[in-house]
Image (cartoon, rainbow, N blue to C red):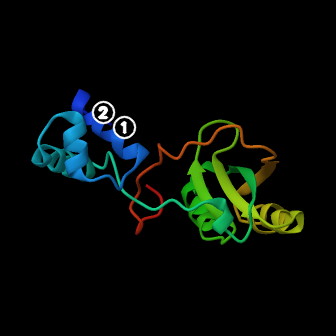
């Protein structure tokens, strides 16, 4: 994957949109000292190249469960993608990543009580064919979280 060719104007535009994606093209153009058509064209190009996307981010307060946990999964290499897809279909699971290292799948989930989490990790995930081991970590305090960088994926495929 080649690194995108972005100039200083692209970076400034992305910085403005990262602060408030609802800002008008006219206001961005005024701030950057360019015309509105330039802003519109740059945004369109960045979207077409899948370097930016616009979406609504919801806070944890809108979720039914607000306790955060990470489940590291050690799975047979031949079945990693299928197991990741299966885990992604579990309602408590909010994110699934295929990783390198001692664990090849990482799942992020929200849960209400430890029984729910135990049922998810030990009952559902560990019992999947090809899963050898799981380890669960509970988030007790969030020191930093930035939503500025997220992976842009196709909704239809789920796993890129």
Dot 1 crowding, Cα within 10 Å, few <14, some 14–19, many 20+ = few
Q: Are marks 2 and 1 in contact (CB under 8 Å)?
A: yes
Choose between 20 and 160: the one closer to the eye.
20
Residue 7 in view (yes/no):
no
Q: Position of residue 138 (x, y in %)?
A: 81, 49
Instruction: Name the residue located 70 percent from the left edge and 59 percent from the top edge.
Output: 109
Image location (x, y in percent) of residue 150:
47, 48
Q: Secondary structure at mark 1?
A: helix
Judged from the image, the secondary structure of the residue bearing numbered disc 2 is: helix
**Residue drawn at point x = 25 percent, y = 37 percent:** 31
Left or right placement of residue 48 versus residue 114 in this view? left
Q: Can see residue 123?
A: yes
Q: Work out whether 24 lies above or below 110.
A: above
Residue 11: mark:
2
Residue 15 disc label: 1
Category of crowding for the residue at label 2, using alpha-carbon neighbours closer than 10 angstroms: few (below 14), some (14–19), many (at least 20): few
**What residue appears at the point 56 percent right and 64 percent down from the top-left corner?**
85
Identity of the residue furthest to the right in this view: 115
Quadrant of the rendered structure where residue 115 is?
A: bottom right
How far apart, in angstroms, are the residues tagged by discs 2 and 1? 6 Å
| Vertical order, 14 against 43 (above or below) | above
In the drawing, what numbered circle is on residue 119?
none
């Amino acid at each position: 994957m080649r690194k995108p060719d972005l100039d200083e104007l692209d970076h400034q535009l992305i910085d403005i949109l990262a602060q408030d994606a609802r800002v008008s093209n006219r206001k961005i153009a005024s701030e950057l000292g360019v015309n509105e058509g330039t802003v519109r064209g740059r945004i369109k190009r960045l979207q077409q190249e899948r370097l930016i996307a616009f979406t609504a981010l919801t806070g944890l307060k809108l979720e039914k469960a607000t306790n955060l946990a990470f489940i590291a999964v050690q799975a047979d290499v031949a079945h990693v993608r299928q197991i990741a897809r299966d885990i992604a279909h579990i309602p408590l699971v909010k994110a699934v990543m295929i990783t390198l290292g001692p664990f090849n799948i990482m799942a992020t989930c929200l849960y209400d009580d430890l029984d729910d989490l135990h049922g998810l990790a030990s009952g559902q995930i560990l019992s999947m064919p090809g899963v050898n081991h799981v380890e669960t970590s509970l988030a007790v305090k969030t020191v930093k979280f930035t939503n500025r960088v997220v992976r842009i994926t196709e909704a239809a495929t789920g796993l890129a």
